Image (cartoon, helix red, strand yellow):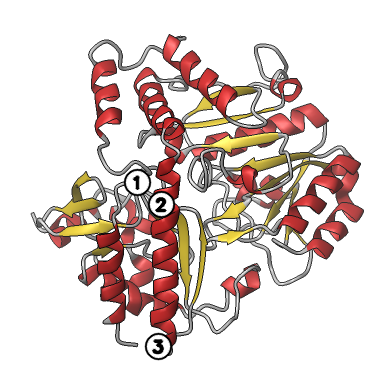
Amino acid sequence: MSNIEIFEESKKYMPGGVNSPVRAFKDVDLTPPIIKRGSGAYIFDEEGNRYTDFVGAWGPMLLGHCDEDVVKAIKDTCENAIAFGASTELELRLAKHMCTTLDNVEMVRMVNSGTEATMSAVKLARGYTGRDKILKFAGCYHGHFDGFLVSAGSGLLTEGIPGSAGVPEESIKNTIVGQYNNIENIRQVFNKYGEELAAVIIEPVAGNMGVVKAENEFMEELRALCDKHGTLLIFDEVMSGFRVSYKGAQSLFKVKPDLVTYAKIMGGGLPCGAYGGRRDVMEKLSPLGDVYQAGTMSGNPVVMAAGLATLTKLYNNHEYYQHIDSLGLKLQEGMKAIAKEKGIPLVVNRCGGMMTVFFTNKDKVTLYEDVMSCDTNLFKRFFTHMLKSGFNLPPSQYEAMFLSVKHSDKDIEEFLDAFRKFQV
């Protein structure tokens, strides 16, 4: 069957023909390619077309598609174990590896997704502090838990307003929305709600409004305010963990989070998540404490094996990050130079192996308002051109591109050649 035949048939049995909305390519008005296989930096659709992949399963494929060591770990484990819903040595090995190689992670709890990790971390923070309210930031996505699906509105400081149908106001009445990289804003939030805030949750490198890194001064002020008011600071590293560096985005700041959430890369491409942090906080979890959280598939042996193989390989090969950063810099600077030559309004934000191309007349993109200034129609034309040229990019102006270990200088040069042929 062709891509369009499969997609049209899928619409009969799945809402919009997909199991996650962005896959429908609705924002770019195209029929999505139906992917059949992947190898290294490349994916192939049902019609045999090859694409150089800069999505990487939305981040997890840092080692490239079907890395040989990860595949071997999965195959070896599957011969003896699929699932038990019981403790295994593999979950101990992965937990120990994370606690001994990551900063500020003294204990960890495995879960099955990034959404589960972030919602569980917030529940734990509420149980630990005895408070209800949380602060999140406009433009930061923490999964589809009701309490996170809040839009910022137009005011400087807003209380929760549902950002999705099916989310009652009751579910988000304790969610406060702040402005990313706006110090005065968070001071106002803490002045009003400081004694009621259980936690602040933030992506230290945002990825779902495009790549926007938190500024050092902003993060330091956030930590100081949390300390002053007894509020826990949660770093959502679902996207940035193990990607911007092995130790994640927290290694970019002189700030220690109380809790950290992970997913994406730590599962080696399989569904996985985790949250961890200070021992005294984590010990509030059942069966030690009174904060209940459980999951039949948490710590699944096949997933643990894939995750352990991935993280061990990344930890033992720090040159991978140098390779990715070098390629990222080449891509970033090349696109900026071409855009200048062609008169294309462009800002390129990058942090390690995460990058977003913003089509905007702004000089820089550091605030949510900057992101909202982008020309989405120009992005659509860019996306369509690059897809037809054989490059798989995120089908949204507000998402991140991802580089892998398997990308090469040739891949970057071919990308830049294709961009040079883009007709505005």
Image label count: 3
Q: Identify which residue is drawn at 44% across, 10% down.
A: 89
| Rendered view: 142 above or below 390 | above
What's the amino acid at mark 1? Val
Q: Earlier in the sequence, mark 2 or mark 1?
A: 2
Q: Which residue is mark 1?
A: 405
SS class, disc 1: loop
User: Is 276 left or right of 96, judged from the image as shown?
Assistant: right
| Percent of width and height locating residue 154 | 71, 72
Do callouts 2 and 1 mark residues in contact (Cβ within 8 Å)?
A: yes
What's the amino acid at mark 2? Ile
Q: Identify which residue is drawn at 72% across, 26% down.
A: 278
Q: CA distance from mark 2 to mark 3?
A: 26 Å
Q: Which residue is mark 2?
A: 324
SS class, disc 2: helix
User: Is 167 left or right of 354, judged from the image as shown?
Assistant: right
| Percent of width and height locating residue 271 | 40, 34
Q: Identify which residue is drawn at 30% across, 80% down.
A: 420
What's the amino acid at mark 3? Glu
Q: CA distance from mark 2 to mark 1?
A: 6 Å
| Rendered view: 107 above or below 114 | above
| Rendered view: 196 above or below 401 | above
| Rendered view: 356 above or below 60 | below
Q: Earlier in the sequence, mark 1 or mark 3?
A: 3
| Percent of width and height locating residue 209 | 54, 62
